[in-house]
Image (spheres, helix red, strand yellow):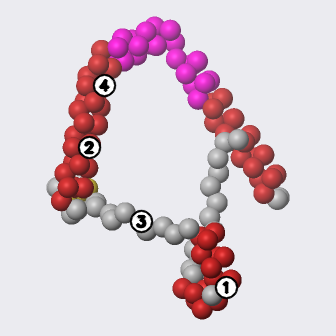
Amino acid sequence: MNATQALEKLTELYAKRDLLSLDKKAAIPAEVQNVLDEIEAEYAPKQEAISTEISELETRVKSLVLESSETAKGGSLQAVFAKGRITWDTKSLDGYAKANPAIAEYRKQGEPSVSIRKV
């Protein structure tokens, strides 16, 4: 099996999973779904309020950590401070390295990676 064939098989499996989820939802009797909908309606505003509060507090924590430039650690969570990444103009440096080969010894290349994305 080549990568293209494997991707096609993976697409089929994703579709089967989605169909199974739809079948499962369709198997719920109307009266049960009505009860579930009522419960969802009752709890949705409470969940939204908590989600909003979480989002605001996360933003505040991030701001405090950025101001202090230090990682903060609580009992169950931590906010890890990371310095800004340094980047270089690789295209220009590669051109410079052609004219100045000595700089090439400082070039490092990471391992390749693969991510699966929907087309």
Please provide percent x and percent y for residue 89.
56, 68
Q: Which mark is residue 58?
A: 2
Picture quadrant of residue 15: top right
Q: Main secondary structure of the magenta part?
A: helix
Q: Amino acid at mark 1?
A: Ala
Q: In the figure, 2 relative to 44: above or below?
A: below
Q: Secondary structure at mark 4?
A: helix
Nearest to the eye among marks 2 and 1: give it.
1
- Residue sitting at 32 percent across and 63 percent down? 82
Which residue position is annotated with label 4? 48
Identify the magenta region.
21-41
- In space, the residues marked 3 and 4 are separated at their CA atoms by 34 Å
Label 3 residue SS: loop
Measuring 23% from the left and 32% from the top, which residue is drawn there?
53
For the residues bearing labels 4 and 2, Cβ distance under 8 angstroms: no
Residue 67 placement, left or right of 81? left
Q: CA distance from mark 4 to mark 2?
A: 15 Å
Q: Please state which amino acid type lies under the numbered disc 4.
A: Glu
Q: CA distance from mark 2 to mark 3?
A: 22 Å
Residue for badge 3: 85
